[in-house]
Image (tube, rainbow, N blue to C red):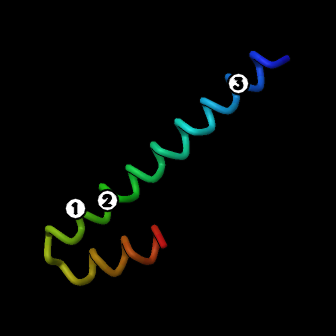
């Protein structure tokens, strides 16, 4: 049982970190484009 809980904990952490990294990447790409409409759209989606 302990191994299952540890596995689920690690998988949850991987998903959380991966999701956060993906959101940060999309926002970074939108800001680098300097397109106000794209920035507004991405910011509305990720926040």
Residue appearing at x 40%, y 57% in the figure: 23
Dot 1 corresponds to which residue? 29
- Cβ–Cβ below 8 Å for labels 3 and 2? no
**CB within 8 Å, label 1 to label 2:** yes
- On the rendered image, what quadrant is the N terminus found in? top right
Placement of 2 over or under 38, stated as above or below: above
Which residue is outermost to the right?
Answer: 1
* Of the image marks 3 and 1, the number of the one nearer the N terminus: 3
Q: Residue at x 52, y 36 (%)?
A: 14
Disc 3 and disc 1 in contact, CB within 8 angstroms: no
- Binning the other alpha carbons within 10 Å of mark 2 as few (below 14), some (14 to 19) or many (20 upward) gives some
Provide the secondary structure element on which disc 2 rests: helix
Secondary structure of the residue carrying tag 3 is helix
Residue 1, disc: none
Q: Tell me the quarter of the picture where residue 34 sits.
A: bottom left
Mark 1 surroundings within 10 Å by alpha-carbon count, few (fewer than 14), some (14 through 19), many (20 or more): few
Image depth: mark 3 or mark 1 in front: 3
Give the crowd class for mark 3: few <14, some 14-19, many >=20 residues within 10 Å.
few
Q: Which mark is residue 26?
A: 2
What mark, if any, has residue 6 been given in the picture?
A: 3
39 relative to 2, above or below: below
Q: CA distance from mark 1 to mark 2?
A: 5 Å
Residue sitting at x 77%, y 19%: 4
| Secondary structure of the residue carrying numbered label 1 | helix
Query: Relative to residue 19, is residue 10 drawn left or right?
Result: right
Residue 26, by quadrant, is: bottom left
């Amino acid at each position: 049982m302990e191994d299952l809980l540890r596995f689920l904990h690690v998988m949850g952490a991987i998903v959380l970190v991966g999701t956060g990294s993906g959101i940060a990447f999309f926002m970074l790409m939108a800001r680098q484009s300097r397109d106000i409409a794209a920035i507004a759209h991405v910011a509305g989606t990720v926040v």
